[in-house]
Amino acid sequence: MPTSDYDPACLPDLLPLYYRRLFPFSQYYRWLSYGGVSKNYFQNREFSFTLKDDIYVRYQSFTTQNELEKEMQKMVPYKVDIGAVYSHRPSQHNAVKSGTFQALEKELVFDIDMTDYDDVRRCCSAADICSKCWTLMIIAIRILDRALREDFGFHHLLWVYSGRRGVHCWVCDDAARKLSVAARSAVAEYLSLVKGGEETLRKVVLSDPIHPFINHSLSVVERYFQQYAIVEQDILCSKESVDKVLALLTTHIKKDLTIYYQDEKNPMKRWDRLCTNKAFHQGRLSSIKKGGQYFDKEIMLQYCYPRLDVNVSKGVNHLLKSPFSVHPKTGRISVPIDLKELNTFDPFEVPTISLICEELERPRADEAEEDDVKDKENEQEAGERRRIRDYKRTSLAKYVKVFDRFLEAMARSWKGEMLKKSGELETSFSVFLTFMSFTYT
């Protein structure tokens, strides 16, 4: 669906319909309640609304799903951000004694924005993206998802398309939500590899031996690098792009490649030569500063490794755009990403608010078939209970389904924990009864 089909001027007319009939409030409330983990968990959560004309309203909080629905339908926010769970209701923060209003918990979050790659992508810049540079988001998700699951042991990761030029990750495990600022900073630093500002040429420096996490990351990058960087981004084609690559190399290797590149114009052969030059110069490592033997890997990582906004991750009270929020510029919905279909996820196919509002008014061809199946399964109750949720009539349905699967996995985990605790309690009680029987005999 092309962005041109969305007219930002229509947003004030579309948002009331979206919040009234399409926003998945039930699943949303279920997510942020975390199975009723504590009495005030949802009502102590901060929401922030950006209204028309960039009016910014912070410290919104709600007791129930119904209250949240009514307020969003009343205020019609252009953007919704989610903050921390506080010690008190955020809406009453001004009435709380100074110093006692504290951010207690929040999901561990990551924000990856395409603009942070502007120094290494040639196809687009600023807020623009295309299918070529979107590969960077795929690489980022692959690397970070593996590390968060395997290196840190987290299970419940919700990956979300921002609606324009990036992706967000919400790590929702109980342990992740309770992390301190110091612990969040440590996780973010562990995952950060590309460092330095515009003045820094060599932003990735590897030491020997290479850390296992970096080796895992390299295995992901290597799967995409040649097609993405050499072919699609053409980083070894124009003089300007070649000079940027050569600037990352040692003097000896840079000199050799400069001579070779004068005659060889094929980008893939140029890259192969760069890699073979590494082997040729292994005997000169005494003249290469520490880590210089990995320059080909450093180049791959500098051009492809995920670039994190560490400040977003380390702050407990930092706000992040909510899933299912609408991006005012593109009109696209901020939707969950199904990692099983990550390679085929296309940000340009994510529905706009104008599309789904239009779809809502026309029946879908497969809707009758779905009803027939349900009728057969519930023949006696189908007459009264047939009611398809409005979003199921739109392109939003498949993304809500991804969200449903995420929530179901979390629910199974909660149930497993409860059964485990119940079993431990039962065992403890049995031990207690055994002890008491010995005591009184």
Image: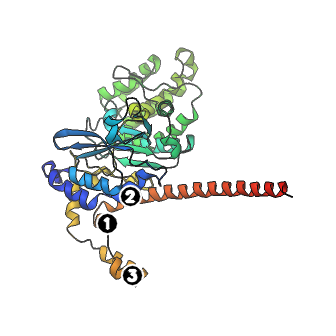
Side (left or right) of 127 relative to 337: left
- Which callout, 2 or 3, points at the residue further toward the start of the chain? 2
- Which callout, 1 or 2, points at the residue further toward the start of the chain? 2
Q: What residue is shown at x 47% (from left), y 47% (from top)?
A: 172
Count residues near mark 3 (Cα–Cα under 10 Å), then give few for <14, some for 14-19, many for 20+: few
Amino acid carrying label 2: it is: Gln
Residue 335 horizontal/vertical position (percent): 34, 52
Q: Quadrant of residue 116?
A: top left
In the structure shown, which secondary structural element does the residue marked by tag 3 occupy?
loop
For label 2, the residue is 27
Q: CA distance from mark 1 to mark 2?
A: 14 Å
Amino acid carrying label 3: it is: Glu
Residue 252 horizontal/vertical position (percent): 46, 18
Q: Nearer the viewer, mark 1 or mark 3?
A: 3
- Which callout, 1 or 3, points at the residue further toward the start of the chain? 3
Q: What is the residue that sits farthest to the front in this orientation?
A: 440
Q: CA distance from mark 2 to mark 3?
A: 24 Å
Can residue 222 be seen in the rendering of this structure? yes
